[in-house]
Every structure is written in C-alpha cells, then in structure tokens.
Amino acid sequence: MSRAGKKSLEECLERVVPSERVQRDVPMREHTSFRIGGPVDYLVTVKSRSELVAVLGCCRRVGVPYLILGRGTNLLVRDGGFRGVAVRLDGAFLDLEWEGRRVEAGAAVSLADLARECGRRGLSGLEFAVGIPGSVGGAVVMNAGAYDRSVSDVLESAEVLRPSGRGEGPTGGPAGGEVARISAAGLGFGYRRSCVQDEGWVVLSARFELVPGDPVAIRALEEEFTRRRRERQPLDLPSAGSVFKRPPGHYAGRLIEEAGLKGLRVGDAQVSEKHVGFIVNLGRATARDVLELIRRIQQAVFERSGVVLEPEIKIIGEDS
Ligand SMILES: Cc1cc2nc3c(=O)[nH]c(=O)nc-3n(C[C@H](O)[C@H](O)[C@H](O)COP(=O)(O)OP(=O)(O)OC[C@H]3O[C@@H](n4cnc5c(N)ncnc54)[C@H](O)[C@@H]3O)c2cc1C
C-alpha cells in the first residue's frame, strides 16, 4: 500500500473506531490455529454493525482489500502476510438471542460453545459441532460439519451485510452496505462451501432451528464426539483441521495413507501421524513448508489414484 493510501486509510479508520482497536503490522500467526502467517497491515476490531460498515467503507474508499477474520481455524496465511485490513468481530457480534427452539447467534460466537449451550438447554441438532473450533460466521461460510451433519442442516437463515452499490467486490465501490436476512436455501450451501464469499457478503448473525431433546442424551453424544476427536486428531499440535475436502467417492485420509505419506515432512510441516488428513506445525513451520507439503501430497495421490485433492483450507496473502 502506498504511503498516501496508508495515510488516508488511517485517517478514515481514526474517525470510525477508537485508535486502540486499530493495530498495525500484526503477525497473523498470532491469529490462526496453524500458528503460521506473516503480518497483516492492519487488524481492526469492530464491536457493532455500524463500526463494521464504516470500516469496510474506509477500505473501499481507499481501495484496500479486507479479510473478515473468524477464529482463524481454517486459514493458511502466506509468509509475506496480507496487504490490507483484517477485520475482527467482537462486542455485539457475541450476542445470543434465544426464542423457543431457535437461537440467533452473532457471527463471533464460538460454534462449539453455542453447541454446548444448546445441549444444556435441551436443544438438539448442533451436537456434531462441539469439536469444531471456529466461529459461527466462519461455520456458515464453510458450511462446517462432522459426522454426516453440517451447519446447513440446522441453519434457518443468516443476516449478512452486502456491499452497497451494484455488486462491487470488497475492494471497490462506495462506502456503506445493506443488511439482508437470507434463508438457508439462499446461501448456496454445498460440501464445505456457501455462496457467502463469492457474493462478497459478511455474515453478521445466524439463526439456528433446533429440536427438543434430552439434555442427558445430548451430553452423552457430545462426549462421544469429543472422545473420538481426542483419539483420532492431533489436537496437541497447531493445525487447521483437515486440509483437503473429501473427494467424491473417496476419503482424503485413506488416499494419503495409501500413497505412503503419513509422517511426511517439509521443514516443520508434517502430515500428521495421528490423522493423515491433518497437516501439523511441529514448531517453526512456514506457509511455504505447508504449501510445498500440500503440493507433494496432491502429486503423490494423483499419481497413485488419479484423484485430485482440493484444499479445504483458505489460503490467503502473499509470499515473503
Ligand atoms: C483441530 C481442528 C478441527 C477442525 N474440525 C473441523 C470439522 O470437524 N469440520 C469442519 O467443517 N471444520 C473443521 N475445522 C476447520 C474450521 O474450524 C472450520 O472451517 C470453521 O468453520 C472455520 O471458522 P473460523 O471462524 O475459524 O473461520 P476462519 O478460519 O477465520 O475463516 C474461514 C473463512 O471464512 C471467512 N469468514 C470468517 N468469518 C466470516 C464472516 N463473519 N463473514 C464472512 N466471512 C467470514 C474468512 O474470511 C475465511 O475466508 C477444524 C479446524 C481445526 C483446527
């Protein structure tokens, strides 16, 4: 970003959020579960919808890309970092509103905490999510799921912010935005995908519709899912969960194992010994290590089985 660009962005941000919530040159490794990633130019924390609209307006006015940061559990940020603004949701985005079998959860709420609270209230449907470490917003974007269930099975609708103007992307167009409630059917859900990012929307909140259940039975199922994860996943090491989507008719893990790649290492990035679908950071892994490991896995699996593995994790930023 040019010096003039930085100056006008900073002047704009200063007008719309308190200065202590605008951080400069923040290493993304501090904000991702992989513990990898170079610096983002600005990390801005917004606590209300109006602040969010205003901050995105600043970005668009100055022509600076932005990234909505959830809990960073599905993100690989390259070593050169991200030239733009990472926006973190807080404050009002942590609100929960309960109404009978429904709950409206702010985008920054922890999906796993929400799932557990539903269980305590005798509401069933989100048990699968107790071990998914992301936010509600990230879970809607990714249509997060496990054990043959996913967010789209329990989501009734989501409120999204649409960039104002005529379909401008995140980096163009005038300031402002329009809030719309979109039904689950309108969110373009598929396997680990939604249309939220294609449309350039920001998830503000999500309304889940659950069914009454026995809190004891719900708790038992949650404990079973948690036990399975502890047994099968390398939860003691930084990772971004499963790196690849499940290819139709196959399991990514099995293909990787059959290609003899368990434990394969590039630098400090390793194909987990415990769950071959995960790449773990053994300490000082760089994004370059992870990307090279991904390339080698894709090549070896393709050569052995003819299947193209597609990353599930979002890869952003620039090389160093
Ligand atoms: C140990 C471990 C286990 C995991 N297990 C599972 C699993 O079982 N199933 C599964 O599906 N995933 C799993 N994941 C991956 C991850 O937790 C999910 O994909 C989760 O939904 C990502 O949420 P997040 O808030 O961390 O999103 P982030 O990683 O912060 O962001 C992901 C993408 O969503 C965008 N985004 C985030 N919030 C918003 C918003 N409010 N509006 C618009 N865009 C937004 C970001 O810009 C980014 O492109 C696992 C990860 C780990 C580390």
Image (spheres, grey):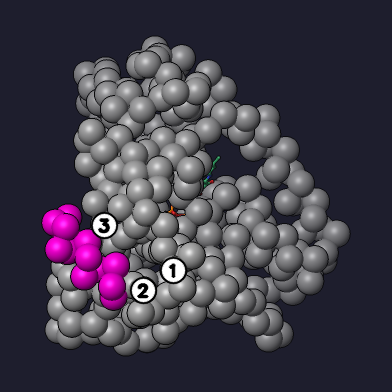
Residue at the image point whose x is 30% and y is 53% from the top: 41
Q: CA distance from mark 2 to mark 3?
A: 16 Å
Which amino acid type is marked by label 2?
Glu
Whole-percent x, y for residue 117 in the image: 73, 66
Q: Is residue 226 magenta?
A: no
Report the quarter where the N terminus lies: bottom left
Q: Quadrant of residue 219?
A: bottom right
> Which residues lie in the magenta part?
1-12
Main secondary-structure element of the magenta-colored stretch: helix
- Element class at badge 1: helix
Residue annotated with mark 1: 19
For disc 1, the neighbor class at 10 Å (few under 14, some 14 to 19, many from 20) is few
Point out the frontmost of discs 3 and 1: 1
- Element class at badge 3: strand
Count of number-bearing discs:
3
**Against 115, is 244 above or below?**
above
Which amino acid type is marked by label 3?
Gly
For disc 2, the neighbor class at 10 Å (few under 14, some 14 to 19, many from 20) is some
29 vs 174, left or right, is: right
Which comes before the other along the chain, label 1 or label 2? Answer: 2
Q: Are marks 1 and 2 in contact (CB under 8 Å)?
A: yes
Residue annotated with mark 3: 84
Which comes before the other along the chain, label 3 or label 1? Answer: 1
Q: Is residue 4 magenta?
A: yes
111 vs 217, left or right, is: left
> In the orientation shown, which residue stands out farthest toward the right?
216
Residue annotated with mark 2: 14
Closest to the observer, 217 or 230: 230
**Against 258, is 152 above or below?**
below
Q: Judge whether residue 194 can be spotted in this image.
A: yes
